[in-house]
Amino acid sequence: MKEERKSYGEAIARLDEILEDIDQSKVPIDVLAERVVEAAGLLKRCKSVLTETEAKVKDVLQDLDREFGDPEADGEEAD
């Protein structure tokens, strides 16, 4: 699948392009369905990248909390 190889930035740029073309009625009706399918694939790719990134960031933050301690986990609130 081509969308799987695109970076997040490339996928977003292509999505913007598709949406702008559709919004400005530049997409012929004969290819509209193709563009919608392509956009759906790009959205799935973006969601996958975001979900993966979120999980990685969460893991790193949890590792840091374990290493350096989390004052909020002890019931103390930082002011």
Image (spheres, helix red, strand yellow):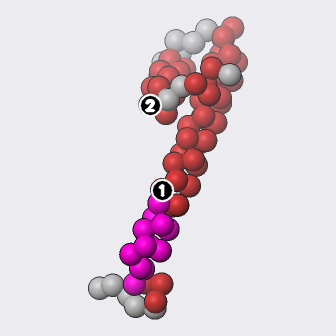
Does dot 2 land on a helix, a strand or a loop? helix
| Up/down of 63 relative to 37, above or below | below
Magenta span: predominant SS is helix
Dot 1 corresponds to which residue?
57
The number of discs equals: 2
Residue type highlighted by circle 1:
Val
Residue 55: image location, x then y, percent? 56, 55
**Residue 6 visible in rendering:** yes
Residue 67: image location, x then y, percent? 43, 73
Give whichever of 51, 61 is nearer the camera: 61
Q: Residue at x 65, y 30 (%)?
A: 40
The residues tagged by marks 1 and 2 sit, at their Cα atoms, a distance apart of 19 Å
Mark 1 nearby-residue class (10 Å; few <14, some 14–19, many ≥20): few
Q: In the drawing, does residue 13 fall left or right of residue 29?
A: left
Residue 67 belongs to the span the image colors magenta:
yes
Residue 33: image location, x then y, percent? 70, 18
- Magenta region: 60-71
Mark 2 nearby-residue class (10 Å; few <14, some 14–19, many ≥20): few
Quadrant for the N terminus in the image: top right
| Up/down of 71 relative to 9, above or below | below
Give whichever of 65, 49 is nearer the camera: 65
What is the quadrant of residue 78 in the picture? bottom left
Dot 2 corresponds to which residue?
9
Q: Residue at x 52, y 53 (%)?
A: 56
What is the quadrant of residue 42 in the picture? top right
**Residue 15 visible in rendering:** no
Give whichever of 58, 45 is nearer the camera: 58
Query: Is tag 1's residue or tag 2's residue first in the polypeptide sequence?
Result: 2
Q: Residue at x 42, y 68 (%)?
A: 64
Residue type highlighted by circle 2:
Gly
